[in-house]
Image (tube, grey):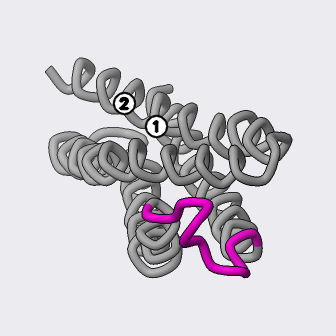
Amino acid sequence: MLSTLEVITTVVVGLMVGVEFSVAFVMNPIFNALPEDSNQQAHSHGGRMLGAVMPVWYIGSLVLVAVWAIAGWHHQGTGLVVTAAGLLILSVIMSILLLVPINNQGKTWTPENRPADWKEQMNRWNRYHYVRVAVIIAAFTLLVAALV
């Protein structure tokens, strides 16, 4: 049973990492190459769509990792799983404090109502997102290492 939980958790976290990596290094560069109105609209739409899904994914991933840590407490690799949980907690805190406030504003913007500094705000979101991606990649790496 524990091995099934380990695999499911690793896959769920790995997929989340893949989505966030894709946002940072594939989707945002594509959006940024679009003309200004299309760029901003793409970011707003992405913020609405992923803003609805990702909180569940982040919290669900954290819960799975916590269950793995508890269920496997006396097994080899538990320290790695606990550390991964700590990193996922950090990613949730970063999201709530740094990224979500910007996203909540950005997802309502249109070419008619966006603020003059919308690009600066998106650049700030991107910088925070790069750090968050590094944090969740580290968490995922620890989970994979704990499987060995």
Position of 26 with respect to 95 (left or right) is right
Q: Is residue 36 above or below residue 31?
A: below
Closer to us: 130 or 108:
108
Please count the marks in the image.
Answer: 2
Q: Is residue 26 above or below residue 44?
A: above
The amino acid sitting under disc 1 is Met
Q: Quadrant of residue 57?
A: top left
Q: Which residue is mark 2?
A: 12
x, y percentage for residue 5?
A: 23, 27
Observer able to see residue 74? no
Q: Residue furthest front?
A: 112
Pointers 2 and 1 in contact (C-beta within 8 Å) = yes
The amino acid sitting under disc 2 is Val
Q: Which residue is mark 1?
A: 16
> Main SS type for the magenta part?
loop
Label 1 crowding class (10 Å Cα cut-off): few <14, some 14-19, many 20+?
many
Position of 18 with respect to 91 (left or right) is right
Q: Residue furthest right?
A: 33
Q: Which residues are magenta?
A: 108-119
Position of 33 with respect to 108 (left or right) is right
x, y percentage for residue 102?
A: 52, 73
At 47% from the left edge and 28% from the top edge, which residue is drawn? 15
Instruction: Provide the secondary structure element on which disc 2 rests.
Output: helix
At 68% from the left edge and 37% from the top edge, which residue is drawn? 27
Instruction: Provide the secondary structure element on which disc 1 rests.
Output: helix
